[in-house]
Image (tube, rainbow, N blue to C red):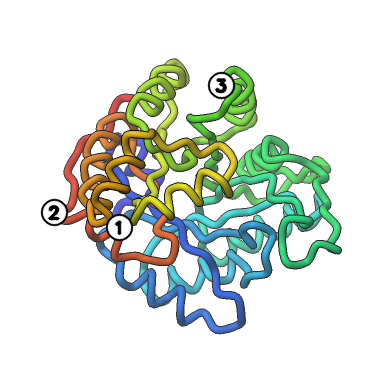
Amino acid sequence: MPTLKEKLARGQFVVTLELDPPRGADPAPVLAQARELAGRVDAVNIADCPMARLKMSPIAVAALVQRELGLETIFHLTCRDRNLLGLQAELLGAWGLGVRNILALTGDEPARGDHPQATGVYDVDSTGLVRIAAGLNAGRSLAGRELPGTGFLIGVVANPGAGDRARELKRLEEKLAAGAHFIQTQPVFEVGVAESFAHAVEPWHVPVLFGFLPLTGAAMARNLVVRVPGISIPNEVLAHLDADPTCGPSLARRLFADLAPLGAGIHFFPMGHPERVLACLAPQSTVAASPA
């Protein structure tokens, strides 16, 4: 069975999606969600205390999903909660557990979450974390000590709808120069935004998985715009959702079909509802990835 790394390398269209770890010590809820999608997606992302709220370790959940379901995972690792020693230790532990894919993130500020008194470490940002992971891949620690090399597939995040496109692309270029291998984007709701982003990154020849968040209604859409920085939803889409509250699934399937040819794959944000992913994948897409 080819790995995610192999699929991206040969230009196969891939589908990934993001799952939150459980709030407590019981992994059953996230395993149940992942089980619904086994065989329909190529890998699942396991978030790292998203929005700075306490959740189970993403590495532990990723290892359990792989062991119990045989479904490949991408674990998120943030710079918020770990110093330079901790980041390297987590990466080595993940590799030892068989988790081969990482998404490098700076991480939300603790003040945004449920432990605002927690200290944000931030010894490095996401670019620095990519550099650390790339160093381990090359068989050396940050201190320069030789180690048995890892082989992580290193992913990073980008926002195609960022207000300052030039700054966003500059930061992305720095992450790629540090050793990143693929990009997963924030949710995109406009085909034109995705087309423009795909054109901008085309010279870098890096696989892009466009973020996709199926909308269920106008209230959800407006809440996202207010609460999530960087998200923009066209007025035309809001008008459709206002006029027909049941049109969300059909709009999602149409956007999925329009976005799929623009990148190497699609990255779903199911918001705790795997059935929204299944609705877009039925029948499962066979779109070929673009050369980018």
Q: Earlier in the sequence, mark 3 or mark 2?
A: 3
**Crowd around label 1: few <14 · some 14–19 · many ≥20 (10 Å):** many
Q: Quadrant of the N terminus?
A: bottom left
Identify the residue at image location x=62%, y=72%.
56
User: Dot 3: what SS?
Assistant: helix
Name the amino acid, label 2. Answer: Pro
> Residue 209 or 274: which is nearer the viewer?
274
| Distance between mark 3 and mark 2 Cα atoms | 35 Å
Q: Residue 18 carries which label?
A: none
How far across and down, in percent of the image, does residue 193 sit? 40, 26
Of the two numbered discs 1 and 2 on the same chain, state the one appearing first in sequence.
1
Question: Label 3 near label 1: C-beta < 8 Å?
Answer: no
- Looking at the rendered structure, the secondary structure element under dot 2 is loop
In the rendered structure, find residue 165 and report the number of the disc placed on it. 3
- What distance separates the C-alpha of mark 1 from that of mark 3? 29 Å
* Circle 3 Cα neighbour tier, 10 Å, few/some/many (<14 / 14–19 / ≥20): some
**SS type, badge 1:** helix
Circle 1: residue type: Val
29 in relation to 191, above or below? below
From the top left corner, tell me how far across and down residue 125 is, in percent.
73, 40
Q: Which residue is drawn at 36% across and 42% down?
A: 238
Identify the residue at horizontal 78%, vertical 56% (top origin): 111
Point out residue 138 in the picture as x, y percentages from the top left corner.
63, 39
Residue on which disc 2 sits: 283
Q: Distance between the residues labelled 1 and 2?
A: 11 Å
Q: Residue 277 carries which label?
A: 1
Q: Which of marks 1 and 3 is nearer the N terminus?
A: 3
